Amino acid sequence: MSKITTQKGFTLLIAIVTTAMLLLVSVVVINIALKQLLIVSANRESQNAFYIADSGIECALYWDTKNPTLISSFATTTAGSVQCDGETIIQTGTQTVPTNPTQLSLIGGGGSANPTSIFSVNFGTGCAIIQVTKSSTGTTTINSRGYNTCNSSARRYERGITISY
């Protein structure tokens, strides 16, 4: 006598369910990996923006305190010029600062009516906008904004550093 089985195709059903579960787990793992890649990329660009802001601060500090002419480039009585990363920025001219709205760079010589110098530097991997304000009390404030890219885009990161002395 032969035994009649009613479980035909059960192995196929188990194989399909197992494959579907493995596919679901794979999709979830790939989704997590892609999100991690976006986070790592954003962190790298944010870090670049911070380092560019720090480079802007260092440049302004040098030309304010260690200027070879022994006069601050940002003195309100005398126009000056600075050189950062091989780029020379003069007091006024055709160099514009990419603020909103854009303005011409001003380095020193603004008098008491305009004690703020402003300029931008292209560091190759990004840009910095630096403002140096000399107060009547002798305090100097340097505000540097670093950007991971020099053009405005959806993935543009801004980091800033402000120091006073």
Image (spheres, helix red, strand yellow):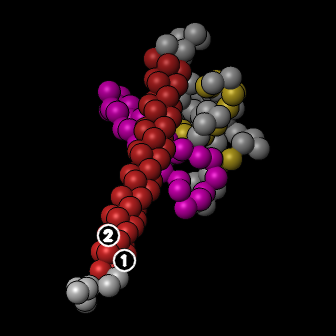
Residue 117 position within the rendered picture, expressed as x and y whole percent measured from the top left: 54, 38
Residue 106 seen in this snapshot: no
* Magenta part of the chain: 137-165
Q: Residue furthest right?
A: 94
Residue 136 image-quadrant placement: top left
Q: Mark 2 near mark 1, Cβ–Cβ under 8 Å?
A: no
Residue 153 seen in this snapshot: yes
Most foreground residue, 44 or 165: 44
Which mark is on residue 12?
1
- 25 lies above or below 116: below
SS for tag 2? helix
Which of the image's four quarters has the C terminus? top left
Kindly identify which residue carries mark 2: 18
Question: Residue at (25%, 85%) from the top-left corner?
Answer: 2
What is the three-letter code of the residue carrying label 2? Thr
SS for tag 1? helix
What is the three-letter code of the residue carrying label 1? Leu
Most foreground residue, 144 or 21: 21
Give the Cα distance between marks 2 and 1. Answer: 10 Å
Task: Name which of mark 2 and mark 1 comes first in the sequence.
Answer: 1
Which-is-in-front pick, marks 2 and 1?
1
Residue 30 position within the rendered picture, expressed as x and y whole percent measured from the top left: 41, 59
Residue 11 image-quadrant placement: bottom left
Inspect the magenta stretch and tell me whether residue 124 lies in it.
Answer: no
- 80 lies above or below 27: above
